[in-house]
Image (cartoon, rainbow, N blue to C red):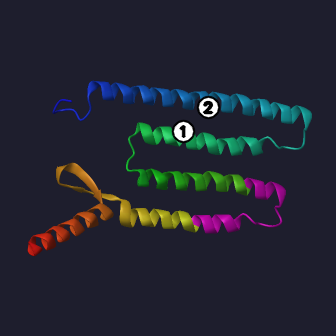
Amino acid sequence: MNENNAFSEESLRKIAAQKVSFRFSVKIHAYVFILINVLLIIVNLVFTPGIYWFFFPLFSWLIGFNMHTLAYILYARGVYPMAKRGVIYHLTSYIFVMLFLFIINFTTLSAYYWVIFPAIFWGAAVILHILFYIQYLSGKPEEGRKFKSRKERAIEKELEKMRKKQVKKN
């Protein structure tokens, strides 16, 4: 490694190769998703007209495709730390799964809105996750352009106290 770059040429090549592989796998997933769901729509319309079931596998697969794509985007954009990724995954999962559950509720038991319960309780958990992240895990810039979370700053402060006590004892 040289002083100007944080990564060696070999490390950068490995990262680039991994990004290309991940991007390729997302593209394959997209093509297969489109192909299979077009076939399912055709099968549905030809063999069971009037009963529209194709959107159940379409939307359930969309959840997986969304998470695969999101994982690639977060990796490619260098979104760190993992706590931030966790919040993004949790919020995105909530949105897509709740959309799917609303569709299921309104197509099967539209007289009874059972989907409100998971929407409220899981929604509360998502809000708590976001608030916890903002309060304890989000970073603030410090000297040398490093980001430290509140937890990391508290650990540093506690270490400093412990060092002072150690010096006083000696």
Q: Nearer the viewer, residue 56 or 13?
A: 13
* Residue of label 2: 30
Q: Is residue 102 above or below residue 71?
A: below
Residue 53, by quadrant, is top right
Residue 67 locus on image (x, y percent): 57, 44
Amino acid of disc 1: Thr
Q: Viewed as shown, does residue 50 lie left or right of 81?
A: right
The stretch drawn in magenta includes residue 119: yes
Main secondary structure of the magenta stretch: helix
Task: Tell me which segment is drawn in magenta.
Answer: 103-123
The stretch drawn in magenta includes residue 38: no
Question: Which circle's residue, 2 or 1, is located before the other in the chain?
Answer: 2
* Residue of label 1: 69
Q: Nearer the viewer, residue 73 or 99?
A: 73
Residue 140 locus on image (x, y percent): 28, 58
Residue 34 locus on image (x, y percent): 68, 31
